[in-house]
Amino acid sequence: MIWNETIECMSRDKLEQLQSERLSAMVERLYYNVPFYRQQFQKNGIEPGDITHVCQLKSLPFTTKQDLRDNYPFGLFAVPTSEIVRVHASSGTTGKPTVVGYTRKDIGIWSEVMARTLTSAGGGKTDVLHVAYGYGLFTGGLGVHYGAEKIGATVIPMSGGNTQRQLQLMHDFGSTILACTPSYALFIAEAMADANMPIESFKLKAGVFGAEPWTEEMRREIERKLHIKAIDIYGLSEVIGPGVASECPHQCGLHVFEDHFIPEVIDPETLEVLPNGRIGELVFTCVTKEALPLLRYRTRDLTVLNADRCSCGRSIVRMQKVLGRSDDMLIIRGVNVFPSQIETVLLEMSETRPHYLLIVDRVDNLDQLEVWVEVEDQFFSDEIKKLEDLKRKIQHTIESTLGISAKVKLVEPKTIERSEGKSKRVIDKRKLT
Amino acid sequence: MIIKQLSVFLENTSGRLTEVTGALASAKINISAFSVADTAEYGVLRLIVNKPEAAEKVLKDKGLSVHITEVIGLVVPDEPGGLHRALKILSAEGISVEYMYAFALGDRATVIIRTESAQRTVEALQRQKLELINASDIYAL
């Protein structure tokens, strides 16, 4: 089902026209209302009225998390606090919290994009939506809540924690859609089994999961254990919260609600905009938001955009499930390499995610990449010929997808050091002086 | 006639083999035959033991990659052309040999053969009245 067919299935021409009008108005608002942006524009010689088309977006300055910190708490707000009806904030484990604000209209936009998200996950007015995202300063709980009310679903505002009670109410109220982090969904599934509550006695049909990275493997596990369709949703509080992008039941990329949040993918090193199909850092421009309309906000998340129409009918651009963080990028012989790309190559060759390690070194002034792959059962063959074939195939695929040659080394399981269950992905031995 | 062989992935570092043999010894598992295929970086250890499933568990618990592979054991008479006869049969049947290794059993040699299909190999060789060793006999060695 599609909540807003006019927008979600709009032709590229019409959408660009809409984006252009909105961008132009946004630049004007930023120029007059946010001193930080005015200074940036003046430094770059940009006047309000200069920006008339979305293709000019690439000439505008970026915004980073540091800019939000430097202007803590309300310095980047484009409206007076009398217009702000809500504030959310990140936990701020690595410094000051990131503070975001919403006007009444912003809350409306948020409800709209969350309504699209929940509809695309198969939700409607007859559904019972169990919201186990945290309520409070975190955007997860309230974000889903407003969207669920908008589509007319019955909302159970559980928030996180107290799993026994969650199970009880989910069971007794006949919840049909679960909204929480994917790791909590797995936790719930285990608690269900421990409590001897058969999944058949629940009415769950779908789950909307996000707010943390998760793998296809986790998705399959959740779907198998909870008998549901697990939908990946994407969002970040700086942009709006949940509701920036969402999968449809085809699960082939997340539809970005680009009438509100214009996505770009850039090379994190050169900051050049990359064409669709290339991996890079995701950047958002919030063209409709009033309180905190961030311009070209660098998410640090890595993805690939795809503008082909989806089989669900939506024409808005799709982003791949987040592939990693741009901070993890390595430059090897001048080529940008993300550990997640190697992981994708390895995943294509097996059902489960193998443990791997990238070792980068500089020998005779030339960068060398060595990829260690643990030979777990899914890779192991009794025949040397097949193992050597596997090695060559990995080597070849890395070379053709990344454009650099790598030496692949097959190692025994558990060779690669784990820390807290996660394995270390990269060792960079290069000493650059 | 089909024998269960354990195949273990091992890195080519000193002491790895000892760990495997040590683990099997402390689990009171007896090795009847073995071979090592190696490359510069890693090797595959192939073992025939008296309790294949128990040995698989012991080695998996040590975190090793272990597979059980089906092989057959051919008794080769100690005379010219003994091995040749068997291989000719397989070649005529279009069965390709992946690898083989031999060990002495009393005054005769036994050749462990891994082919693409253990079942077809057994049938082909038995039709020609070649002597194959029973799985239970080899586990009991």
Image (tube, rainbow, N blue to C red):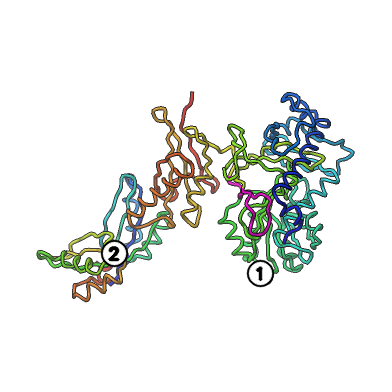
Q: Which residue sits at x=48%, y=51%?
A: A354
Circle 1 chain:
A
Q: Which of the numbered marks, if any, corresponds to residue A197?
A: 1
Q: Residue A306 placed where, x, y %?
A: 61, 48
Q: Residue A39 placed where, x, y %?
A: 76, 25
Tell me the amino acid under the disc marked 2.
Thr
Side (left or right) of A344 relative to A189 = left
Residue count near mark 1 (Cα–Cα under 10 Å), binned few <14, some 14–19, many ≥20: some
Q: Which residue sits at x=61%, y=40%?
A: A281
Side (left or right) of A296 relative to B101 = right
Quadrant for the N terminus of chain B in the image: bottom left
Mark 2 or 1: in front is: 2
Q: Which of the numbered marks, if any, corresponds to residue A107?
A: none
Viewer-proximal residue among A373 and A319: A319
Side (left or right) of A339 relative to A116 = left
- From which residue to which does the magenta span run? A306-323
Q: Secondary structure at mark 2?
A: strand
Judge whether A99 appears above or below B10 on screen: above
Q: Residue B106 placed where, x, y %?
A: 15, 65
Q: Residue A119 placed where, x, y %?
A: 73, 59
Circle 2 chain:
B
Q: Which residue matches tag 2? A: B115
Residue lying farthest to the right in this orientation: A82
Helix, strand or loop: magenta stretch: loop
- Looking at the rendered structure, the number of numbered marks drawn on it comes to 2
Judge whether A350 appears above or below A21 on screen: below
Quadrant for the C terminus of chain B in the image: bottom left
Viewer-proximal residue among A34 and A400: A400
**Magenta stretch: residue A315 in it?**
yes
Residue count near mark 2 (Cα–Cα under 10 Å), binned few <14, some 14–19, many ≥20: some
Real-space Cα distance between discs 2 and 1? 49 Å
Tell me the amino acid under the disc marked 1.
Met
